Image (cartoon, rainbow, N blue to C red):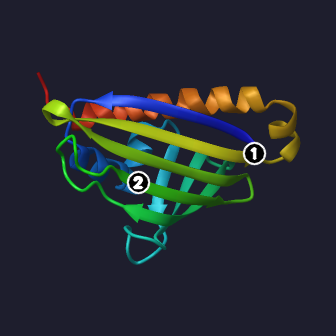
């Protein structure tokens, strides 16, 4: 398996960051060559499912996911409980788990932690080059989180 963690401080309240992160179709706005569609009647809560399609036309893959834990932040004050969403990735190309937390910080800011532990198929890619898979994942998700932050942070 290949694991990586990305963290980011965001100059926006935890509830606003949470709302952006769980708006699954918006992930396609931040991740290049990716579209996301919700596949369940409800997009939120445990059991919500969605598919991220990455690639160009037929040269791509589907990454189906299901929410297995849903705990929005309790508020925006530094002492409020953070939000956490756990996701099961169960596709043919990528399998594993992902989760993110949104921690309230002083001044109406927040801190995001994003973690993934995945196997990329064919399995030999992950087995032979876990550091490479982790580095690519870290770079891609770092870029996506920074793009999300630019959307939710107030304009100066």
Q: Residue at x 45, y 71 (%)?
A: 46
Gap between marks 1 and 2, in whole Å? 24 Å
Q: Nearer the viewer, mark 1 or mark 2?
A: 2
Q: Position of residue 92 (x, y in %)?
A: 74, 58
- In the displayed image of the protein, which residue is found farthest to the left? 156
Q: Quadrant of residue 29?
A: top left
Mark 2 is surrounded, within 10 Å at the Cα level, by few (under 14), some (14 to 19) or many (20 or more) other residues, namely some
For marks 1 and 2, the one nearer the N-term is: 2
Position of residue 143 in the picture relative to residue 1 (left or right)? left
Q: Residue at x 50, y 65 (%)?
A: 67
Which residue is denoted by mark 1 in the rendering? 120
**Count the marks: how many?**
2
Query: Helix, strand, or loop for circle 1?
Result: strand
Q: Position of residue 94 (x, y in %)?
A: 70, 51
Closer to the camera in the image, 151 or 109:
109
Closer to the camera in the image, 81 or 63:
81
Position of residue 128 in the picture relative to residue 30 (left or right)? right
- Residue 55 visible somewhere in the drawing: no
Marks 1,2: beta carbons within 8 A: no
Which label sits on residue 83? none
- In the displayed image of the protein, which residue is found farthest to the bottom? 41
Q: Residue at x 76, y 43 (%)?
A: 1
Tell me if residue 57 comes above or below residue 129 in the rendering.
below
Q: Position of residue 33 (x, y in %)?
A: 53, 39
Q: Quadrant of the C terminus?
A: top left
- Residue 74 visible somewhere in the drawing: yes
Query: Helix, strand, or loop for circle 2?
Result: strand
Which residue is denoted by mark 2 in the rendering? 84
Q: Residue at x 55, y 26 (%)?
A: 139
Q: Position of residue 43 (x, y in %)?
A: 38, 68
């Amino acid at each position: 398996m290949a694991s990586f963690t990305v963290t980011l401080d965001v100059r926006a309240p935890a509830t606003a960051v949470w709302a952006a992160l769980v708006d699954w179709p918006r992930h396609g706005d931040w991740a290049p060559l990716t579209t996301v569609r919700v596949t369940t009647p409800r997009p939120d809560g445990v059991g919500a499912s969605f598919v991220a399609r990455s690639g160009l036309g037929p040269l791509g893959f589907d990454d189906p996911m299901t929410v297995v834990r849903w705990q929005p932040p309790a508020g925006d004050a530094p002492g409020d409980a953070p939000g956490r969403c756990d996701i099961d990735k169960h596709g043919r190309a990528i399998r594993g788990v992902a989760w993110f937390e949104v921690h309230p910080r002083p001044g109406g800011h927040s801190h995001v932690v994003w973690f993934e532990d995945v196997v990329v198929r064919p399995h030999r890619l992950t087995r032979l080059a876990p550091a490479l898979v982790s580095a690519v994942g870290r770079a891609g998700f770092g870029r996506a989180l920074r793009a999300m932050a630019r959307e939710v942070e107030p304009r100066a």
